[in-house]
Image (cartoon, helix red, strand yellow):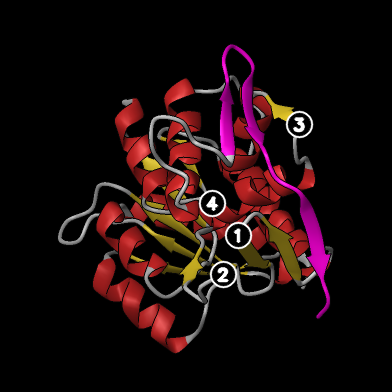
Amino acid sequence: MTDTKASLLVVDDDAAIRELLHEHLSRVGYSVRTAADGDAMRRQLEAACADLIVLDVMMPGDDGFTLCREIREHSRVPIIMLTASSDETDRVVGLELGADDYLAKPFSARELQARVKALLRRARFTRADNPRYVLFDRWRLDTLAHELVSEAGERASLSGADFALLQLFLSHPNEVLDRDTISGVTRGRESMPLDRVVDVAVSRLRQRLGDQGRDPKLIKTVRGSGYLLAATVTHAPE
C-alpha cells in the first residue's frame, strides 16, 4: 500500500474543517471519507475499514476521547486527535487512551498531511521490516498482530503509540534513550518534548509489561538522561 492509496476517515463536527481536509487530502491522492459524529463514524467503519482516522476531541454526543477508547477496544488503526485546547491535559489523555499523535487547532492542512504520511509510513515499517516474533524478559511480542504474550500465555494488545515505543526500546536494548528520541516516536514528529507526555507514554508501557512499582526492573529511569530497557532481546522463528 502506498501513502496515496490509503483510506482516511476524518471525524469532526465542524463542516468547514471536514470540507477543507477532504479537499486537501483527496487532492494529494488519499481516499477520504468524513463523519460528523460518533454514529456517522461507526457507520463508515462498518461499511469499510480505514488506514488512519483523524478524530476531533470536542464533539456533541460521544467526544473524541470516548470514540478513541471505543476504537482501541478492537482496532490498532493509527489515530490523530485534533484538539482546540492548548492544555497539555487533553494531549496526555489522548495518548493514554491510545491515540498515536495529536494536532492543536488551528493547524495547516499541510502539517496534518505530514503527520498522516509519517504515521502511515511507521505503520508500514512495523508490518514489513521487522521479524514476526521478538523475545525479551518474560514476553514475546508479535509484531504483526501488535500483541504481547506472557510466559503464562496471557495476551495483551498494544495501541499504535505503545507498540512504536516498545519497538524503539527493543531496537536499542540496554541503551539510554533520551526524551527527544522517545518524544519523536510516540508523538510522530520532531519537536521539543513535553515531559509529561513522555512520562505518560513510558508509564503506560510499563503497565502493559507489569513493570510498575517504585523501582521498575525492565524499563529503568536514568535520572537526567532518559529511559533504558534492561533486557536481552532475541528473535524467534516464525
Which residue is pictured at 75% across the width and 41% down the height?
A: 173
Q: Label 1 to label 3, Cα distance in Å?
A: 19 Å
Q: Is residue 85 visible?
A: no
- Mark sitting earlier along the chain (1/2): 1
- Mark sitting earlier along the chain (3/2): 2
Q: Label 4 to label 3, Cα distance in Å?
A: 19 Å
Q: Where is residue 54 drawn, in percent x and y?
A: 46, 56
- What secondary structure prevails in the magenta region? strand
- For the N terminus, the image quarter is bottom right
Q: Label 4 to label 1, Cα distance in Å?
A: 18 Å
Which residue is pictured at 44% across the width and 39% down the height?
A: 203
Q: Label 2 to label 4, Cα distance in Å?
A: 20 Å
Disc 2 element? loop
Which residue is pictured at 54% across the width and 50% down the height?
A: 161
Disc assigned to residue 59:
none
- Mark sitting earlier along the chain (4/1): 1
Residue that carries the numbered disc 2 in the rendered image: 151
- The three-letter amino acid code for the residue at tag 4 is Asp
Residue that carries the numbered disc 1 in the rendered image: 138
On screen, 64 above or below 90? Answer: below
